[in-house]
Image (cartoon, rainbow, N blue to C red):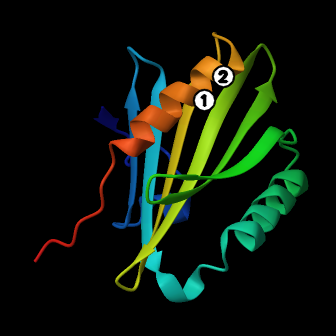
Amino acid sequence: MRDLRDENLRAYESSPSFFYLENKISNLDLSIWFASENIYPGIKKFWDNEVEGWKRVGLPSPQHVSFSKIGIWEATIYEMEYPGYTKSYIKAHLVKEGVWTEIILSIRSGSPRDSARLKLEDTLKTIQVKENR
């Protein structure tokens, strides 16, 4: 995975609590963001706010949206259609010890949707959050 935080990202993405990684071989992108649990509105409200924001800036509407529990994570799974390709996503949330962790996994969907989703789910299941003192 390669860290891309210094490559023209939006202001909040340059925060020391934001990480953006990519694996070009598997076409897998991963971003992680940490914040106070006080600002996390819950998965449904968060999702509604995300979709509203995407509409305002003209991004495509998410397709095949589902909500699921994947291991310790609350997850929203969906696809986005872009010109010439489709991407599968999982937005996963965990609130633990006062910290809200958001992980976004995405992969170009060259394979059937279920296969891309399974790869993202399998990747998410390997991610652990531990307190480091």
Where's residue 121, x and y in %? 50, 37
Residue shown at 82% from the left, 56% from the top: 51
Q: Amino acid at mark 1?
A: Arg
From the viewer's perspective, is 20 left or right of 114? Answer: left
Tell me, for residue 117, which label it has, or none.
1
From the viewer's perspective, is 126 left or right of 103? Answer: left
Whether residue 108 is visible, yes or no, is no
Circle 2 Cα neighbour tier, 10 Å, few/some/many (<14 / 14–19 / ≥20): few
Where's residue 38, x and y in %? 54, 89
Where's residue 21, x and y in %? 38, 39
Residue on which the image places disc 2: 114
Between the C-alphas of marks 1 and 2, the distance is 5 Å
Are the residues at dot 1 and dot 2 in contact (C-beta closer than 8 Å)? yes
| 2 relative to 58, above or below | above
Which quadrant would residue 84 be assigned to in this image?
top right
Residue shown at 40% from the left, 43% from the top: 125
Tell me, for residue 27, which label it has, or none.
none
| Quarter that holds the C terminus | bottom left
| Quarter that holds the N terminus | top left
Q: How many badges with numbers are in the image?
A: 2
Q: Residue furthest bottom?
A: 38
Circle 1 Cα neighbour tier, 10 Å, few/some/many (<14 / 14–19 / ≥20): many
Q: Amino acid at mark 2?
A: Asp
| 47 relative to 122, above or below | below
Where's residue 35, x and y in %? 45, 76
Q: Secondary structure at mark 2?
A: helix
| 26 relative to 126, above or below | above
Whether residue 20 is visible, yes or no, is yes
